[in-house]
Image (tube, grey):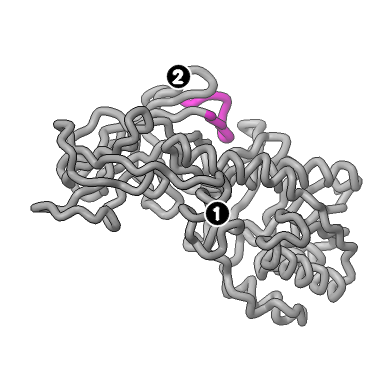
Amino acid sequence: MQNKRVLLALSGGVDSSAAAVLLQKQGYELVACTMRLQPKGSASACHNEEDIEIAAQVAKTLGIPHHVADLSHDFDEMVVRPFVEAYSSALTPNPCVECNRKMKFGKLYTLAKELDCEYIATGHYARVTYDPERHRYLLLKAKALGKDQSYVLYTLSQEQLAHTLFPLGELNKKEARKLVAEAGLPNYSKAESMDICFIPDGDYVSFLENYRGQTFTPGSFVDLQGNILGQHRGLAAYTVGQRKGLGIAYSEPLYVLKLLPETNEILLVTKKDLYYSGLRADQVNIIACEQLEDGKVYQVRCRYHQAEIPARIWQKGINELELEFVYTEENRKQIAAPGQSLVIYDGDLVVGGGRIIEGLRQIN
């Protein structure tokens, strides 16, 4: 390996710090970069500025050059605004996927080239390998499946995978934290962040309303026959499959089946009418091959923390696919929230993925 110079996305958290320690031990020349995602001095920037300060301390302790890239405008335009627009269009977006695609492996990937770095590295729990038989770089799940983050990385291209390092792919969180502690870094006990980074209090509806400068319009809950069951507080406050927080008294539990932006209505059903036999997805990216084999059964995941389920898949051109779930008595029936990511697996291998457009053929 001639060029071992690496741009490390150093967030200030335990994982990226552990990645720094590992890469140093492996002989890489590191350059650390922390993204400023909120305008400096803004009311929402406090958490980000604290992370930047911690990252600077980590870099200083390890003797690594540290850069701060002010990407606040890009982050707003490429991640936050599309997030708001998606909810306004009755979609349920996944901003972490977009942040990885457009920021870490977009803006930082470009910066790596400008700094003469051969690789970009992050603290994600995933693995990359090269398959000489396929002549392709492959994305794999992390060894520690409980920490696996391959779901949010399915958009990576062959070029990006060829120049990406995931040092934590073979480790678990406990081992990563131990590395950080043994290196004498100040953030070894730092807690994990569980919320969307730009909505730290988790109240995404208030965030959306404040960002838009207006409240969402209330409307009607309706059933399959069009009967009005009650009033909702705005489409953005609900997602497909939701049961809690509907505020409706009914003889049995009700679930959100579909958001209807054309009429500002939300379609509610009982559990027997909730599930789908398949779904459609667009914005497709296939990693493991040039194109999927039509009708082949893969494992798919429709949300980050959902279990995988077998599905038969047909690729409809380059950017769209359709699948049919293969249900058994053992697996769960699936719902499909438009806007969420569909990720396709073959064992540990990430075959590819796309954005869910709609659930198909409702079943009982």
- Looking at the rendering, the stretch of residues picked out in magenta corresponds to 283-293
Residue at the disc numbered 1: 149
User: Residue at image x 61%, y 41%?
Assistant: 81
Task: Count the labels in the image.
Answer: 2
Q: Judge the density around disc 1: few (<14), some (14-19), many (≥20) Cα neighbours within 10 Å.
A: many
Mark sitting on residue 316: 2
User: Residue at image x 22%, y 42%?
Assistant: 268
Front residue of 330/198: it is: 198
Q: Please, what is the three-letter code of the amino acid marked with disc 2?
A: Lys
Q: Secondary structure at mark 2?
A: loop
Q: Judge the density around disc 2: few (<14), some (14-19), many (≥20) Cα neighbours within 10 Å.
A: some
Is residue 170 at all visible to an observer of this figure? Answer: yes
Q: Is residue 43 above or below residue 355?
A: below
Q: Please, what is the three-letter code of the amino acid marked with disc 1?
A: Gln
Q: Is residue 9 left or right of residue 292?
A: right
Q: Are marks 1 and 2 in contact (CB under 8 Å)?
A: no
Q: Is residue 343 above or below residue 13?
A: above
Q: Secondary structure at mark 1?
A: loop
